[in-house]
Image (cartoon, grey):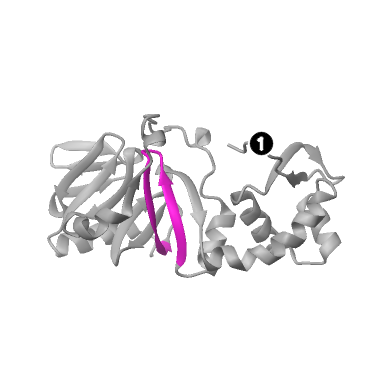
Amino acid sequence: MKTRSLELFLKKQKKDNSTLGFICYGGVRKEPARKVNVRRYFFFFGQNSVPKIDMMFIYRVQDIEALKPHIKVRKAIKEQALTAIKARKDRPEVFTKAIGDQIVEHKPADVTLIFRTGHVLRGKVLGQTRYELLLEVANCQIFVFKHGLLEIQMHGKCQGSQKKLSERLTDIFAGGPKSRAEVETITGLDEDAIKKCVGWMRLQNIITKDASDKDPDGNSRWCLLKEGDDQS
């Protein structure tokens, strides 16, 4: 995706005379693409506006029959009735640099996205920007806002390429907490490879960071996640 991906996405939908479905905290909103405009932090639908932070994802209404079997909802999350986190500093880091690196490395990356509204999508990431993803589901394109994500799960090659190395690192962490720099010294692997694997292991709930335990250089150490522990 190019930098101004949202504008390009909407421009194409207007050209195709599409009707768009917007999944928001308040439910689904359907609008003709030609009536949709974006100005910084808001979507404008004629005289009405919706904050962009309230949006989860956008799909084409004409694709809904193909998409229906692939759009799931987790009841337990939906019942929490989560709302938008306005202050960026208060938002949990769901889409980490490690995830972004894996998506870049494994094009098209196979992922499951779990949203704060309880919606679940599994598809292939066709592109990403700092705040957005373009996801392919059932040969249809869905435009995703990262601020609406609660969890991301990686599949296929994204997972398999890290599994073997993670087994080696698991043995190392079994001997006690280690920082990334200490793992680099022990294994002789380059920094980038270790960062990617540690990021993957964190996503799989294999390890967790102990901010109170640091190496001599002040780097936080990672340790194996014990049964019953919770990283959230």
In this view, the residue in front, 137 or 46, is 137
* In the image, residue 117 lies in the stretch drawn in magenta: yes
Q: Crowding at label 1, few (<14), some or many (≥20) Cα neighbours within 10 Å?
A: few
Relative image position of residue 36 (x, y in whole percent)? 18, 49
Q: Is the magenta stretch mostly helix, strand or loop?
A: strand
Question: Residue, x 31% and y 57% (percent of image)?
Answer: 142
Does the magenta segment cover residue 94?
Answer: no
In the image, 153 versus 90, the foreground residue is: 153
Residue at the extreme front of the image, as rendered? 227
Q: In which quarter of the image is residue 66?
A: bottom left
Q: Mark 1 points at which residue?
A: 229
> In which quadrant of the rendered view does residue 208 lie?
top right
Residue at (80, 56) in percent of width and height: 171
Image position of 48 with respect to 166: above or below: above
Rendering coords of residue 161 (x, y %): 61, 68
Is 36 left, or right, of 201 in this rendering?
A: left
Q: How many marks?
A: 1
Residue 55 percent across, percent down from the top left: 32, 42
Q: Which residue is drawn at 13% across and 54% down?
A: 34
The amino acid beneath tag 1 is Asp
- For residue 168, what is the image quadrant? bottom right
**116 with respect to 28 (left or right):** right
Q: Residue at x 51, y 32 (%)?
A: 90
Q: In this view, does 6 lie to the left or right of 167?
A: left
The quarter in which the N terminus is drawn is: bottom left
123 or 221, which lies in front?
123
User: Which segment did they paint magenta?
Assistant: 109-127
Q: What element carries label 1?
A: loop
The image shows residue 148, relative to residue 192, as above or below, that is: above
Query: In what quadrant of the picture does the C terminus appear?
Result: top right
